[in-house]
Every structure is written in C-alpha cells, then in structure tokens.
C-alpha cells in the first residue's frame, strides 16, 4: 500500500508522492521561544514525530527542518519586560524546548534554524515581492503584502474573498480570521522595541513572523517541497500568509501536502492558567508520571481528532506500555529449546493502519491483539523459539514508530542500581534494608520478581 495523508489544502486524502525518489523533505513549525512550551504544543510536535518515524520505518530518507521563532512581538515584549537581551531570553527557552523533546524521545530536526540567523534572506525575499507588485512600503518604513495581488489568497484556510478588506493593514504577528487584511513583511522599529532591530532598504526594523518561515523553509528544502506540518491554529493566518508570499516570491507551488493536528483540551476544557489546567511537561512529570506515559498519551489519539488530556489517561498509558514491556521481557527470557506454535507478527495490519493517514488506533489495536496472543502461548509454553525471536524483533520495529517500549535511560539506570543494592543487602542478610529498597521501588511503580537466576524488575 501507499501512504495516504489528509491534505489541508485540498481537504481530501492524497497519496504521498515524493518530489525526489525515496526522499521526503518536511518542514514543521517550531515554537516561539518566549516561554516554556505546554502540552498542547507538544501534542503537535508528537504528531510530527510519529509521521517522521513512520516515514523512516517505510525506508524514506527524511530531511526535517523545524524553525525557532526567536524574534516577534511576544519575544520582544517579554525580553523588554524582564530587562534581558533577546538572545538571553530566547536562548534559555530554546534550550528548555530541546530538553523537553529529548525527554519525550522526539527525534530532533536535522536543521533547527533561528529566525534571527536569516534576516538578510528575508530582506531579499521582501525585495522580490515589492518588485513583482505583491508588496508596498508605508510612510513609517514598514512593508506589507498586498493580499489583493494574489487571487488565490485564502486557498488553504478556505476564506471567503468577500472578507478581504482592501487597503487595510494588520501590523500584529497574529490576528483572527475575521477581517483578512494586508500583513506585515517588515515592521519598522518602534521605541518599545528597544535596540532589537536590523538594517534594511526601508529603514531599521525586523521581519514579520510569516516571512521568517518562508525564508528558513526554502533555504533548506528548496522552493517546492513535500510536507509542511503544524497545529490547526497555524492554518490562518500563519500558513495562509506563508503560502501566499512563498508562491509569489518563487512562482513554484511551495508545498505538496499540508498536515495539521487538532487542538488538545484538558479534562474536556480549553487549557487555561485561570482554570488551573495549564500543564507543561515538567508539571506532569512532577506528579510522578514517566515521560513515556506522557508520550503515549499524546500520540495515541489520531492527530486530526481533538485530544482530551487527563491525568487518568496518562496513568492508563503507563499500564499499556508496561504490558508491551512485559511481552518484551518474557520474549527475551523465552527458553531457546522449547517446542511450540508459530505466530507471525502483524506487520501487514500495522502498516495498513499507518498508511491510512497515520491511523494510530488501528496500529495499537493490531499490536495489542497480537500481544494478547503471545501472552496466551507463552503462558502455556506453546510459543516456538523462532517465533519468540521474530516477535521480539517485530516489537523493536514497531517501537521505532512508537518510541515507548525500549527506552532505557537515566531512570532505568537508577532502578538497576537500587536492585543491585537490594541484592547486596539480601546477600548480607540485611533484610530490613532489602525490604526498604523494595518498598522504595514499589512507591515508584516498580515490581520486583526474585528468580533463581537473579532479580527481575518491571513497571507495575
């Protein structure tokens, strides 16, 4: 089968057809680094990670670019309010963002450009738009894109042309769907910006948010590439504006498939600090949940469905992961000389589901149904050694997509150290110490099983 994905531009499922044989070039909108990212942001990055992992599973070469927006209204206002330089503020939150991605086992982009590194390229693009009659300068030294100059404006967001307000302008980096107006490509420097400005033919200032992504994506991926991803909140105005200006600069189609993930809500409500349901990753981890459980929760709902995030769901995710890890443990411990039945992995079902617009529910259903069969055969010592080896290899393949089963890290190393300390206490007949360590591990959800060949631990 071929991988079919829902294209926001056409509003239909389309077969992925790489522009370059065997290679997929994808651009994903990264964070605006003025604060810590929240789990709603992370839901989008998780969908993009699932997509990339499956492309690699399907043996595509993937070139992934994700931008860092380190200059816009929000970053400037926050830096000025805190008395920090723009680089200090955005550097801090960029490092936090990268740490969150690593914690959640999200593959890092091959390129992570910062907007401030591409100001000259943005200026060059704006010059082209002015020369082609798609942009104009205002008296204050700003430059705006003329939406009336591009008849296909609104094609991504399905905007009504009657909504256009010819000649009216919006200077903000973000605005609502009502009132489609000319948007800023270059914003002249204001006293409230401090010294955060760059030179241009139109005077000192800075680029508009939308121009930043056009410059960075095309620099690495060319004027026409395969995939552009983000959250549904990016469709308008950001991606609509990015599409318009990019096509006007190059004359090329820009992107073949646009993919967008739905919103995340918490306990059925929009996430809000005033409601007390606003979570960062660190907020969730501080309550004792594992990164893998958060990861599983964020990816287990189809990316085009609204995800209702609850702490109960995170706990259930851990149980699901534990079951898959227990399958892996028992397969690794399966006797090599036993006789039993053959059981083929569900590769066909897994791939058919993922080929259907990343149908993760179908994928997980196939994997857990197969896991149930494995448990039954192993319980009755009826799984053949060759099937056990094949099953373990298949679990590792599937985890290349999921990224939640084989994730040994610092936490596992700490558990191993405690298990060894307990074994030493048992050898010294220090039963009180051994019991205390067992209780300590139980508090963390770790169950110990003493066997003739040593102690085995697993998540409870």
Image (cartoon, rainbow, N blue to C red):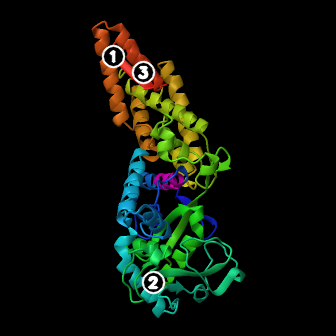
| Residue at x 57%, y 74% (from the top left corner) | 240
Our reading of the magenta stretch's main secondary structure is: helix
Q: Position of residue 52 (x, y in %)?
A: 45, 56
Neighbor class of circle 2 (other Cα within 10 Å; few <14, some 14-19, many 20+) is some
Which residue corresponds to mark 2? 250
Q: Is residue 194 above or below residue 359?
A: below
- 275 w.r.t. 182: above or below: above
Helix, strand, or loop for circle 3? helix
Q: Earlier in the sequence, mark 1 or mark 3?
A: 1
Mark 1 or 3, closer to the camera: 3
Does 12 sit above or below residue 452? below
Residue beneath label 3, please?
A: 440
Quadrant of residue 362 in the image? top right
Q: Nearer the viewer, residue 396 or 193?
A: 193
**SS category of the residue bearing label 2:** helix
Left or right: where 208 falls relative to 456 = right
Residue farthest right in this picture: 162
Q: Give the image quarter of residue 330.
A: top left
Horizontally, residue 342 falls left or right of residue 155, namely left
Nearer the observer, 199 or 329: 199
Q: Which mark is residue 233?
A: none
Magenta-span inclusion, residue 49: yes
What count of labels does the image hold? 3
Q: CA distance from mark 2 to mark 1?
A: 66 Å
Residue at 60% from the left image edge and 70% from the top image edge? 236
Which residue is more in the foreground, 267 or 257? Answer: 267
The part of the chain drawn in magenta is 41-50
x, y (%) of residue 419?
34, 21
Q: Are marks 1 and 3 in contact (CB under 8 Å)?
A: no
Q: Bin the neighbour count of mark 1 within 10 Å (Cα to Cα): few under 14, some 14-19, many 20 and up.
A: many
Q: Residue 223: give x, y in percent of width and height.
A: 43, 77
């Amino acid at each position: 089968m071929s991988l079919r994905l829902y294209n926001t531009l056409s509003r239909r499922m389309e077969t992925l057809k790489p522009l370059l044989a065997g290679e997929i070039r994808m651009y994903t909108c990264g964070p605006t680094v003025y604060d810590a990212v929240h789990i709603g942001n992370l839901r989008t990055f998780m969908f993009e990670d699932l997509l990339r992992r499956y492309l690699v599973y399907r043996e595509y070469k993937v070139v992934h670019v994700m931008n860092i927006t380190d200059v816009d209204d929000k970053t400037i206002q926050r830096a000025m309010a805190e008395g920090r330089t723009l680089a200090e503020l955005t550097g801090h939150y960029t490092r936090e963002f990268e740490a969150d991605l690593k914690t959640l086992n999200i593959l890092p982009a091959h390129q992570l450009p910062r907007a401030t590194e591409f100001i000259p390229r943005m200026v060059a693009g704006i010059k082209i738009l002015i020369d082609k009659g798609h942009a104009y300068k205002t008296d204050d030294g700003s430059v705006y894109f003329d939406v009336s100059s591009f008849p296909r404006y609104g094609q991504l967001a399905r905007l009504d042309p009657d909504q256009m307000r010819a000649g009216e302008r919006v200077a903000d980096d973000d605005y609502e769907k009502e009132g489609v107006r000319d948007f800023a490509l270059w914003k002249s420097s204001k006293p409230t910006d401090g010294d955060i400005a760059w030179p241009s033919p139109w005077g000192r200032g800075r680029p508009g948010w939308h121009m930043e992504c056009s410059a960075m994506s095309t620099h690495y991926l060319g004027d026409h590439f395969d995939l552009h991803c983000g959250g549904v909140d990016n469709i308008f105005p950001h991606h609509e504006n990015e599409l318009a200006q990019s096509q006007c600069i190059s004359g090329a189609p820009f992107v073949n498939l646009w993919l967008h993930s739905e919103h995340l809500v918490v306990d059925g409500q929009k996430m809000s600090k005033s409601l007390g349901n606003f979570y960062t990753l660190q907020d969730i981890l501080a309550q004792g949940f594992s990164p893998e459980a958060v990861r599983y929760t964020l990816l287990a709902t189809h990316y085009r469905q609204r995800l209702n995030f609850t702490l109960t769901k995170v706990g259930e995710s851990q149980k699901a992961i534990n079951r898959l890890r227990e399958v892996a443990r028992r397969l690794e411990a399966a006797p090599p000389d036993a006789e039993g039945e053959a059981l083929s992995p569900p590769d066909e079902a897994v791939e058919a589901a993922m080929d259907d617009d990343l149908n993760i529910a179908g994928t997980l259903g196939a994997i857990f149904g197969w896991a149930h069969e494995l448990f039954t055969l192993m319980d009755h010592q009826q799984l053949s050694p060759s099937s056990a080896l094949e099953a373990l290899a298949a679990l590792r393949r599937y985890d290349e997509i999921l990224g939640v089963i084989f994730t040994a890290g610092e936490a596992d190393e700490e558990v191993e150290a405690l298990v060894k300390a307990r074994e030493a206490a048992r050898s010294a007949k220090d039963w009180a110490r051994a019991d205390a360590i067992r209780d300590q591990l139980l508090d963390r959800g770790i169950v110990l099983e003493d066997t003739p060949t040593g102690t085995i631990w697993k998540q409870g």
